[in-house]
Image (cartoon, rainbow, N blue to C red):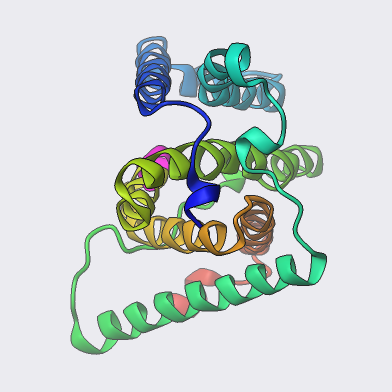
């Protein structure tokens, strides 16, 4: 276990990469707010292409400092970022087993809230992402490519392949798991559902720790995003009448 979590870069390099990434994200958010990018995107005839470009920029910001700083000394090989072969059946076992744990925890907390009238800030459903892209077929396809086809790889390389390994190597698996899950939840900036995202992060971290590879984590992330994206489509198309069910 320890052997796997020995990050090939020193911890001071981890702090540098993390600081640069967070700084670039802060600059991007500040610039977006200043120029009212959201309003500009909504009124653009090329909205979906601009949104795709925005996500590309986000991924460059997330992975750029990591790959540039580590490239000279360590290279950018798959192994460096924790991409290690795992069997198909083992990977599927990690994915479905982890997802059942996630659903179980969410159901227990939901029942606790329902029957005890307990209020838990940050424990709400995630925002429907379909309106971000658009409801026409082409926009939904592009949205699916972003949410299911690319984002899981980028996020898992950064959070599990880089951050989890580095922090776990320095302070141990428990601290590494909690810290990485917390930053993973903050990164998504969905404050109304930060607790479910944090729980999701804990489970993906645990899968990575057990499998000693980020491939099952990527598989889990793809599976989770695919289900969430499909449900979002069904809700937005009123195939699942969520308002009627809630009333």
User: In the image, residue 218 lies at what x, y percent?
Assistant: 66, 51
What residue is shown at x 34% (from left), y 20% (from top)? 19
Residue 186 part of the magenta-drawn span: yes
User: In the image, residue 240 lies at what x, y percent?
Assistant: 63, 71
Residue 111 part of the magenta-drawn span: no
What residue is shown at x 22% (from left), y 60% (from top)? 121
Q: Horizontally, is 117 left or right of 111 in the view?
A: left
What residue is shown at x 68% (from left), y 24% (from top)? 76
Which residue occupies the foreground of this view, 212 or 161? 212
User: In the image, residue 135 lies at what x, y percent?
Assistant: 69, 44
Which residue occupies the foreground of this view, 226 or 88? 88
Q: Is residue 16 visible?
A: yes
What residue is shown at x 63% (from left), y 52% (from top)? 213
Q: Residue furthest bottom?
A: 115
Query: Does residue 85 lie above or below 70 as drawn?
Result: below
Range of residues picked out in magenta: 185-189
Q: Horizontally, is 4 left or right of 12 in the view?
A: right
Query: Does residue 179 lie above or below 103 as drawn?
Result: above
Which residue occupies the foreground of this view, 187 or 113? 187
Which part of the image, by quadrant, shows the C terminus?
bottom left
User: In the image, residue 211 lies at what x, y percent?
Assistant: 61, 61
Q: Main secondary structure of the magenta part?
A: helix
Query: Does residue 197 lie above or below 133 as drawn?
Result: below
């Amino acid at each position: 276990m320890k052997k796997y979590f020995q990050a090939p870069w020193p911890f001071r390099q981890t702090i540098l990469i993390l600081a640069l990434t967070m700084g670039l994200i802060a600059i991007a958010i500040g610039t977006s707010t200043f120029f009212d990018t959201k309003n500009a995107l909504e009124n653009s005839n090329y909205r979906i292409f601009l949104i795709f470009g925005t996500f590309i920029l986000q991924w460059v910001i997330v992975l750029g400092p990591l790959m540039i700083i580590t490239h000279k000394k360590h290279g950018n090989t798959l192994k460096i970022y924790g991409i290690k072969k795992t069997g198909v059946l083992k990977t599927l076992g990690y994915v479905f087993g982890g997802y059942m744990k996630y659903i179980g925890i969410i159901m227990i907390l939901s029942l606790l809230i329902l029957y005890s009238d307990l209020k838990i800030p940050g424990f709400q459903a995630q925002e429907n992402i379909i309106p971000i892209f658009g409801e026409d077929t082409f926009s939904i396809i592009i949205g699916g490519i972003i949410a299911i086809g690319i984002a899981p790889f980028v996020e898992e390389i950064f959070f599990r392949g880089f951050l989890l390994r580095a922090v776990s190597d320095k302070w141990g698996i428990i601290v590494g798991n909690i810290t990485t899950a917390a930053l993973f939840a903050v990164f998504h900036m969905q404050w109304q559902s930060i607790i479910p995202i944090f729980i999701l992060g804990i489970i993906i971290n645990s899968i990575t720790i057990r499998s000693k590879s980020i491939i099952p984590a990527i598989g889990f992330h793809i599976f989770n995003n695919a289900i969430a994206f499909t449900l979002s489509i069904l809700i937005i198309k009123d195939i699942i009448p969520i308002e009627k069910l809630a009333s």
